[in-house]
Amino acid sequence: MKIIIVSNLYPSQDKPYKGTFVRNILEGFKSKGSQVSLISLQETGRSRLSKLIDYLKFTWLSFLSGMKSSEGTVHYVHYTSHSSLGLILASIFKLKRKLVVVSNVHGSDILPGDNGIFSKCKIVISKKVLDISALVVAPSDYFKDVLQENYGVKGEKVVVSPSGGVDTSIFHILPAIQKEYSFGYVGRLEEDKGIFELLEAFRCCQDSYPNLRLIIAGSGSCEVRLRKIANSMKGVTFLTGMSQSQLATVYNSINYLVFPSKRTSESLGLIPIEAMMCGVPVLSSTIGATGDYIVGDMCKLSFEPGDVKGLEVALNKANAITGEEYLLLSQLAISIATKYSSSEVIDDLHRVFETSFNRKESK
């Protein structure tokens, strides 16, 4: 079996942290002895024209690969709405048994979040590639339900695999790291990630607990506005451009991770799971797939998406927890996160590929 991964996101020299889970899956499959190659979007410029040309090249390469496909080759597509157009076009000319497609849906692929023309186009493309796919990989049970209810994908066609999992060789407890921060946020700095609500709730908590500290690690379109707000506050630190090993250090330096997202398209949320692997409990909004792993006593620290008062209450609850209660939460976090270790996740996914496609090849 030959596997060709097609993805618009993949780490590069300029953007080493973009699509790291795709690289983890590729390298994991290679370590299992599979023949794996990659077709990825190569960004050569920032202008709209450059981006269009880059995308057309990417689509052309995936189209050619699809046209050359033969039995025993599997095209494994990540981010269906952005990466599958070339294969959809190739499917018009190729027999289904000679063009085998596996689609891995993520985030806004199937839940775009608005009704704009671009979002509608993404839905049309995703629907088409889901129709021609032999298997569909969903990051969570939540997204499997979305595929079945909104797109009519049969349950037996869907495999749940959490986006390459979490690398336990990187994300684990680091005893030498001191807990410098009360709370931490890691992720994109966008309005719908709930980061403005976090700053507002944190400011309110400081009235009662003036020594609280918050660290924010990430970048995005709202960074300038957020820094301006943070500069008017005490105890807020910003970090950008973090490697995975640096993120592990950040997780180990915080008492709690806050995941305040308002995106219904949160298909999994590897960041909370990475933090939990480091023994860090998570304060999460009740959004998307978070219900898959925010369980037990950690649910008591949850809040409704966009609810500043609810988030403030959760922050105050967390701050009032005893050392013994915190230890139990930390142990719970690790026990849950262990189920998402990359070695187990990639083993299971590779086994599905072998069972589904090597068997067909041998017939």
Image (cartoon, rainbow, N blue to C red):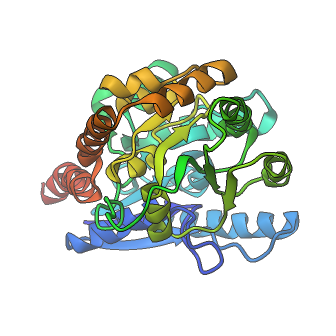
Residue in the picture at 32% in, 26% down: 155
Q: Where is residue 209 in the image (x, y as percent from the top left)?
A: 62, 35
In-front residue for pair 215/113: 215
In this image, 329 relative to 240: left or right? left
Name above or below for residue 35 compared with residue 341: below
Res 81 → quadrant: top right
Q: Where is residue 148 in the image (x, y as percent from the top left)?
A: 42, 23
Q: Position of residue 78 (x, y in %)?
A: 49, 53
In this image, 61 relative to 362: left or right? right
Name above or below for residue 298 compared with residue 333: above
Q: Is residue 182 visible in the rendered structure shown here?
A: yes
Name above or below for residue 275 compared with residue 300: below
Quadrant placement of the N terminus: bottom left
In this image, 129 relative to 169: left or right? right
In-front residue for pair 81/304: 304
Residue in the picture at 60% in, 81% down: 13
